[in-house]
Amino acid sequence: MKIPSADQFWQFSSQHYGRPGVAQACLQLQDEYGANVNLLLLLVMLEAQGMTAEPERFRTVLANQLDLFEQWRVLRRQLKPKLDNDDYLALLQHELMLERWQQQELLQQLTHTPPTQGYGGLFSYLTQLQVTDPPLWQLKLAS
């Protein structure tokens, strides 16, 4: 199975995240269950291609980056009311650069253990997060 390029993953993520309800579902899973949005999008993309990856393989990469992303989001939210629109947009742009870097790290992890044909990675991740009604969330994410 061919691993998507960083550009393919970024383009898929941008388009898919913009679909009705997907961003809201991703952010709700992030805020309520601690889901990683980039991993959600990667698993959705793989399943759209008939491939799957065990989400457990990404745990170390995500754990190593968790503090950085959480601290950045807290800072951005704290600064939002104090900044003009241009400065706030600059913060958001930097956050997008961090997201893109994380996506590259996730893809690098896939090179060590390539995805396999099949489905189930997204369901497995949602179950690990102890999400209520994983099939419903799969539908929301696949919109």
Image (cartoon, rainbow, N blue to C red):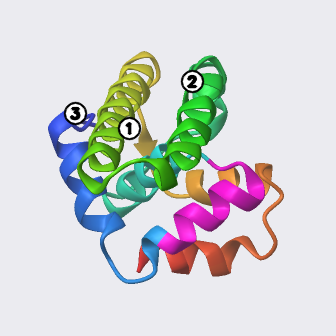
Disc 1 from disc 2: Cα separation: 11 Å
Question: Looking at the image, which residue is at 43% across and 53% down?
Answer: 41
The image shows residue 103, relative to residue 19, as above or below, that is: above
Q: Are marks 1 and 2 in contact (CB under 8 Å)?
A: no
Q: Earlier in the sequence, mark 3 or mark 1?
A: 3
- Which quarter of the image is occupied by the C terminus? bottom left
Q: What is the x, y in percent for residue 21?
A: 45, 81
Residue 99, magenta (yes or no): no
Disc 2 from disc 3: Cα separation: 21 Å
Q: Earlier in the sequence, mark 2 or mark 3?
A: 3
Judging by the rendered image, the residue that carries numbered circle 2 is 68
Question: Looking at the image, which residue is at 40% across and 22% down?
Answer: 105
Disc 3 from disc 1: Cα separation: 17 Å
The image shows residue 113, relative to residue 40, as above or below, that is: above
**Residue 97 quadrant:** top left
Judging by the rendered image, the residue that carries numbered circle 3 is 6
Residue 95: numbered disc? 1
Magenta stretch, residue numbers: 24-35
**Residue 2 quadrant:** top left
**Residue 101 quadrant:** top left
- Which quarter of the image is occupied by the N terminus? top left
Q: Nearer the viewer, residue 116 or 134?
A: 134
Q: Amino acid at mark 2?
A: Leu
Q: What is the x, y in percent for residue 88?
A: 34, 48
Q: Earlier in the sequence, mark 1 or mark 2?
A: 2
Q: Nearer the viewer, residue 127 or 11?
A: 11
Q: Secondary structure at mark 2?
A: helix
Q: Amino acid at mark 3?
A: Ala
